[in-house]
């Protein structure tokens, strides 16, 4: 009986460690994939804290990102039904969201297609068809290391892009 209890305790600990390790940071190397359905579900509710820290400049802006950034990869197509992506930030910082074409690289200080902060929304009309890194971080006028919670909501779908296809 003593061995079964010990084995169960060890198994539960290993299982808990496995689950906590799988919730990794959303970075340029491993971005989240965000593909809301026709109703805009799911939203992203996360924090900019504890994610990508290597972005020093965004959108050819010398001021750059003041702190950690949440990175998601999104697919914008003509078939997408969303009109707007709305962001809500938390206390302690002002969020900024940047949309950089995937082909330009996540941390290459490439030009952004569009950006938004404060109460503004990202509009489908301002995002030509492409794959984008959606980078959410603090505003360049925030204090260094400013970060916090945010929510991103689409009012429609961002479809999935087929990555590979084969017939055997």
Image (cartoon, helix red, strand yellow):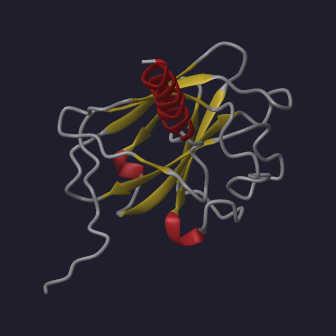
Residue 92, x across and y down, in percent:
72, 15
Q: Is residue 70 above or below residue 120?
A: below
- Return the x and y of residue 153 as percentages of the image width and height: 37, 30
Which quarter of the rendered picture does the C terminus lie within?
Answer: bottom left
Q: Tell me: residue 64, above or below residue 116.
A: below
Q: Camera-side residue: 48 or 62? A: 48
Total numbered badges shown on the rendered structure: 0
In the image, farthest residue toward the bottom: 168
Q: In the image, what residue occupies the spot 52% across and 72% down? A: 103
The single residue placed furthest to the left in the displayed view is 168
Task: Out of 126 and 28, give the one closest to the viewer.
Answer: 28
Considering only vertical position in the picture, is 160 above or below 13? below
- For the N terminus, the image quarter is top left
Q: Residue at x 52, y 28 (%)?
A: 46
User: Can you give x and y, in whole percent of width and height, for residue 146 in the image?
Assistant: 77, 27
In front here: 42 or 129?
42
In the image, 32 versus 17, the foreground residue is: 17
Image location (x, y in percent) of residue 115? 56, 44
Q: Residue furthest right?
A: 144
Indicate whether 155 appears above or below 102.
Answer: above
Residue at the image point whose x is 80% and y is 31% from the top: 141
Residue at (26%, 68%) from the top-left corner? 162
Q: Quadrant of residue 165?
A: bottom left
């Amino acid at each position: 009986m003593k061995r079964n209890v010990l084995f169960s305790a060890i198994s539960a600990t290993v299982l808990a460690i496995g689950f906590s390790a799988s919730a990794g940071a959303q970075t340029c190397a491993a971005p989240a994939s965000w593909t809301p359905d026709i109703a805009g579900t799911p939203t992203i509710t996360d924090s900019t804290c504890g994610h990508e820290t290597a972005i020093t400049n965004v959108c050819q802006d010398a001021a750059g990102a003041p702190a950690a950034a949440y990175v998601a990869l999104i697919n914008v197509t003509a078939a997408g039904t969303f009109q707007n992506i709305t962001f809500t930030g938390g206390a302690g910082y002002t969020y900024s969201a940047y949309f950089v074409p995937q082909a330009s690289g996540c941390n290459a200080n490439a030009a952004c297609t569009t950006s938004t902060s404060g109460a503004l929304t990202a509009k489908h009309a301002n995002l030509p068809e492409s794959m984008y890194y959606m980078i959410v971080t603090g505003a360049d006028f925030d204090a260094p290391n400013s970060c916090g919670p945010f929510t991103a909501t689409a009012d429609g779908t961002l479809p999935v892009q087929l990555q590979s296809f084969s017939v055997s």
